[in-house]
Image: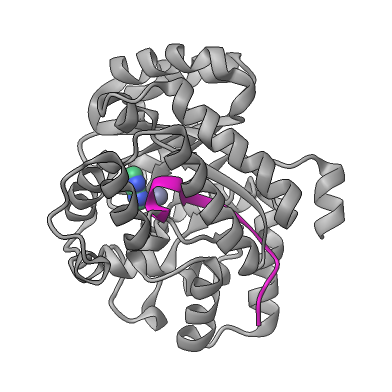
């Protein structure tokens, strides 16, 4: 069955399907290792987060024009709406595109027009989260944030992604304070590869309202208690975790089982669906099939996603 959901952990750049990649590369005159979409996809076998990021960033040089960003986001919004997504809060990585020589105004124009178009055509509600690449460090994040301020009305919050280990949340305290002062929402990837201390720091130093992944929080009982008591949402990405080997190879052993048993506010997302084997409906189908979750548990996960989303309480009441 298709569950109506909000998708809260989705990198728009991670929705670049191979046929789209090839078409954009040809249009923009960018070299690819192969122009056969099936051959490109066949290379998507990863040992860890970094091995994925290396391929991912290399592919993203094909994105150059407003049309590229518009078509990418519209394609995701249409595909996910068909899979039950009623609300999407998607990340984009401005630094990747700026470093590829693309103007931030071009990126925003493409993404924002896609959000508007998808609302009108497929009825999906969507908003944009601006994500900092943690491996480029705090000064670059602050510079990026200042560059994005002229587009303040086109994003609702900030996020933190890319290489986790070695780049703890504490480095980004200042830029998160700047975002809070602007009234922006705050989330961060933590506990995907990094340990529970990364999750503590995201909560205590960055003031995040949700934790992206959070799998390794389970190693610390006091942290589990905190997440439960404060109803802090975790945006868990089962197929991503298997693909990047941040969870055991069989989904039946995924930490989601324990998260539910611990009474945590867990949601399901796809992360980078073009690379990890599917969209949010594919993630639901996989956990239903392989983890034997009950219909009540699946419904809880779907409802949790609206509870955890940054929509107004009025809009939330319409979904729940
Ligand atoms: C990412 Cl840390 C992380 N995980 C998944 N996708 C990503 N894209 C950029 N950073
Ligand atoms: Zn992610």
| Residue 101, horizontal then vertical, whole percent | 28, 24
| Residue 156, horizontal then vertical, whole percent | 61, 30
Whether residue 11 is in magenta: the answer is yes
Q: Residue furthest left?
A: 33
Q: Which residue corresponds to the image point at 67% horizontal and 72% vertical from the top-left?
A: 3
Which stretch is magenta? 1-15
Q: Is any atom of residue 255 visible in this view?
A: no
Viewer-nearest residue: 116 or 134:
116
Which quadrant would residue 35 be assigned to in this image?
Answer: bottom left
Q: Is any atom of residue 98 visible in this view?
A: yes
Horizontal side of residue 123 vs 288, given as left or right: right
Q: Which residue corresponds to the image point at 56% horizontal and 63% vertical from the top-left?
A: 79
Horizontal side of residue 152 vs 107, given as left or right: right
Q: Is residue 3 above or below residue 71?
A: below
Q: Which residue corresponds to the image point at 70% horizontal and 79% vertical from the top-left?
A: 296
Horizontal side of residue 198 vs 155, given as left or right: left
Q: Quadrant of the C terminus?
A: bottom right
Whether residue 73 is in magenta: the answer is no
Viewer-nearest residue: 174 or 271:
271
Q: Which residue corresponds to the image point at 35% horizontal and 21% vertical from the top-left?
A: 141
| Residue 15, horizontal then vertical, whole percent | 42, 55
Q: Quadrant of the N terminus?
A: bottom right
Q: How many badges with numbers are in the image?
A: 0
Horizontal side of residue 91 vs 249, given as left or right: right
Viewer-nearest residue: 189 or 103:
103
Viewer-nearest residue: 182 or 148:
148
| Residue 62, horizontal then vertical, whole percent | 28, 42
């Amino acid at each position: 069955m298709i569950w109506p959901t909000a998708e809260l952990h989705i990198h728009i750049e991670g929705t670049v399907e191979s046929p789209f990649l090839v078409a954009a590369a040809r249009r923009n005159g960018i070299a690819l290792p192969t122009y056969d979409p099936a051959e490109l996809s066949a290379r998507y076998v990863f040992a860890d987060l970094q091995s994925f990021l290396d391929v991912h960033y290399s592919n993203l040089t094909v994105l150059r024009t407003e049309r590229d960003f518009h078509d990418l986001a519209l394609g995701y919004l249409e595909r996910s709406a068909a899979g039950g997504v009623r609300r999407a809060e998607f990340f984009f990585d401005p630094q990747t595109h700026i470093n590829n020589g693309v103007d931030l105004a071009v990126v925003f124009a493409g993404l924002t027009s896609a959000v508007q178009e998808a609302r009108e055509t497929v009825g999906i509600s969507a908003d944009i989260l601006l994500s900092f690449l943690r491996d480029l460090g705090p000064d670059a994040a602050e510079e990026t944030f200042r560059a994005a301020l002229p587009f303040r009305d086109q994003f609702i919050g900030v996020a933190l992604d890319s290489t986790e280990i070695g780049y703890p949340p504490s480095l980004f305290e200042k830029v998160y304070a700047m975002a809070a002062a602007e009234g922006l929402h705050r989330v961060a990837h933590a506990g995907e590869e990094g340990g529970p201390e990364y999750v503590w720091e995201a909560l205590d130093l960055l003031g995040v309202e949700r934790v992206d992944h959070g799998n390794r929080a389970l190693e610390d009982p006091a942290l589990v208690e905190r997440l439960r008591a404060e109803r802090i949402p975790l945006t868990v990405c089962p197929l991503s975790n298997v693909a990047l080997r941040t969870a055991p190879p069989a989904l039946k052993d995924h930490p989601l089982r324990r998260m539910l048993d611990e009474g945590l506010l867990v949601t399901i997302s796809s992360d980078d669906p073009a690379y990890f084997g599917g969209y949010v409906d594919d993630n639901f189908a996989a956990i239903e099939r392989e983890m034997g979750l009950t219909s009540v548990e699946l419904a809880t996960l779907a409802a949790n996603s609206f509870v955890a989303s940054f929509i107004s309480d009025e809009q939330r009441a319409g979904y729940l």
